[in-house]
Amino acid sequence: IHYYLAKAYFNLYQDGSYKEFDSGDEKTVSNSQKTQYLFSARAEMVAWDSFFRTIQQNKKFKTLYFNDIFAKLFAGTIHEAIGQRAEDQIALKMYEDAREMYPLLSPLYRDFNSDADKYGEKFFKWVQKNYKEGKSLNPGKKDKSLLKVADRLKELIDYKYFKMLKKLRSSQFNNLKRNNKIPKSVLSKIDKKNKDSVTVNLELGLVPIKDEKPINLSLNAAFDKNYSTSTKLIAVASNVAIRAFAYDKLGLKPRGLYVGRGGVDVYDSYNVGGMTNIATTGPALQFKVPEVKNEPHRLVIDLKVLKENKIVKKIPMSLTAPLGEIARLTNKEQLGGYLLSTGGKFLVKQGLAILAAYGTYKALNKNGDNEGFAKTMALATYLGSTAAISYSERADIRHWTTLPREIHTSSFYLPEGNYTLEAQIKKSGEIVNNFELGKISVSSKKPSFFSYRRNQL
């Protein structure tokens, strides 16, 4: 939400006009209002940064989405647009933060790393240990499994950082240059005028839907000693007669996944610690959990700049916000806690429903000569109860459906003038799409920002 608010303010500052919602009339924005909108965009990015700082300072730290490279890059772009030296210093710090975050965070996402899940489990344990011991997070070594698409992101970050470093700390920049500490590909892109005139964001696709996934939970979880006293009251249902009733009369499955409390703080609780994937004996009940399916596309996008129908520049775009992977990762992290809270309540209610059905069955079949009717009524009692339970404890699949699946970014210099932008998309080395983004007008007086949205990849 901070990004979209900041982008809206930034566009108002840049365009200097907007259309009335009802009438469609175009309204002009005064210079003082434009300045106000620019600083409103700045305020939104500061608020986004504060949000992440709050997460990082939380001692119960339970997420890997504790920072965002895209947020740093976009914040730097807005600080640069203000054009004050103090704001340039903040922009430099944003780009420096992004450089430190890159080797830590980019391997978490399968768009960049084919072994992202394995890295995520290892990294989550490392994060937990460092935060519990009060240590700061330092950049790690480049993960060897990173794909080439990640190199584009690294090059964009380096370009933004070293470009600003040259402007603000030329002696430090020159020293790094002499010692070959700056990639040659980055040096060749840094313009003598020391500024980007154009930044382009391309929002592609739609974030993957959050849907329901059925799993079988063992009723044994409701009897675990780690659960509350009220939950233990249904431990009577662990006797052999009631279990046999659950299998034979209600048709429950004899094996299911077991939920325990020991591993809530581990990454991917569905597979390790918080919920074991080893089935245990005992009545099993179907329970639906939220699931986000996202397959990495690993698209390679180039931005073509045309003037009078001739290509004057071809700039690589970098995947800066893999929102589909972020959605998958955060849902995966939250699943363990969801099973312990909602899943636990579900099992308690199911246990009570089984007891009620068992009571009905015993009352109607006291002499053993009314088996068919007793079974039918017991099953009806159970199904009536479980219908209400399934509705009240259904999976929460709410999500922001209109978010893009991914955002690609490029920053580069263009002389003042009018141009046309086109995007070329490659997958596995082959061109799969080529389309026009729109016409742009670049001014030499201030940097230009353009954002495009395309729901179909």
Image: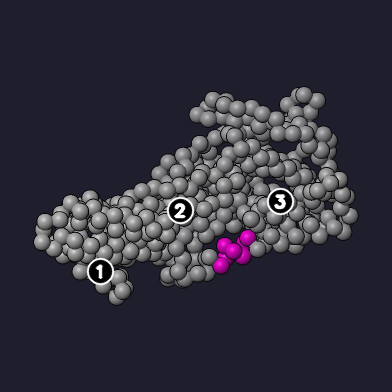
Q: For the residue carrying disc 1, how many other residues have a C-alpha within 10 Å: few (<14), some (14-19), or many (20+)? A: some
Number of marks: 3
Q: Nearer the viewer, residue 145 or 369?
A: 369
User: What is the magenta range?
Assistant: 48-54
Residue 54 lies left or right of residue 146; in this view the side is: right
Asked if the magenta segment contains residue 51, the reply would be yes
Q: Which quarter of the figure has residue 131? A: bottom left
Quarter the N terminus occupies:
bottom right
Q: Is residue 265 above or below residue 76?
A: below
Q: Amino acid at mark 1?
A: Ile
- In what element is the residue under mark 1? helix
Q: Residue furthest bottom?
A: 229
Q: According to the image, label 3 marks what residue?
A: 7
C-alpha span from label 2 to label 1: 31 Å
Q: According to the image, label 2 marks what residue?
A: 331
Q: Which quarter of the figure has residue 353? A: bottom left
Asked if the magenta segment contains residue 80, the reply would be no
Query: Which one is earlier in the sequence, the residue at label 2 or at label 1?
Result: 1
Give residue 386's position: percent from left, percent from top: 34, 57
Q: For the residue carrying disc 3, how many other residues have a C-alpha within 10 Å: few (<14), some (14-19), or many (20+)? A: many
Residue 162 lies left or right of residue 398; in this view the side is: right
Query: Which one is earlier in the sequence, the residue at label 3 or at label 1?
Result: 3
Q: According to the image, label 1 marks what residue?
A: 234
**Residue 246 in view here:** yes
Q: Amino acid at mark 3?
A: Lys
Q: Name which residue lies at 73% across and 57% down.
A: 41
Give residue 370's position: percent from left, percent from top: 15, 56
